[in-house]
Image (tube, rainbow, N blue to C red):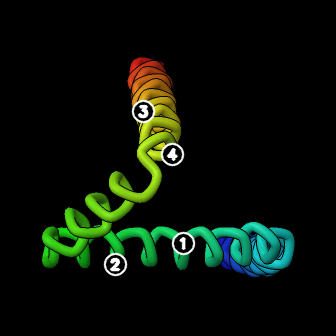
Amino acid sequence: MNGRLVELAVERGRLRERIARQRAEIGSELVPLRNALLVTDRGVAQVRAAVDAVRRHPSIVVAALAVFVVLKPGRLWRWGRRAFVGWRAWRFLRERLDQVQRFKLKL
């Protein structure tokens, strides 16, 4: 019985070493992904900060929009169309991602 416990302890040690190696390999392979996600996180943080600034000071946005309309009304329509297309694309992607998530949950 004692020999069996020793064998189990040795096997457990081997498995722990193997797990440690695999974790190290995964960690080193994910470094590029981590760097990309850091850049993305910074971008998201900047967008959120901009949205918060607009929410705190909506009058500045209205004033800038008024100046933009007075100086170049054609550009306003062009940028308005672009914003609308971007908004629609965002909604489409968000709906598709929700569908994929729900599909994964069903599995």
Q: Nearer the viewer, mark 1 or mark 4?
A: 4
Badge number at residue 49? 2
At label 4, the amino acid type is Arg
Q: Which residue is mark 4?
A: 75
State the residue at coordinates (43%, 28%): 88
Residue 99: image location, x then y, percent: 43, 21
Q: Quadrant of the N terminus?
A: bottom right
Ranked by sequence position, the earlier of labels 3 and 1 is 1
Tag 3–tag 2 contact (CB < 8 Å): no
Tag 3–tag 1 contact (CB < 8 Å): no
At label 1, the amino acid type is Gly
Badge number at residue 43? 1
Ranked by sequence position, the earlier of labels 4 and 2 is 2
Badge number at residue 84? 3
Residue 65: image location, x then y, percent: 30, 59
Residue 24: image location, x then y, percent: 80, 80
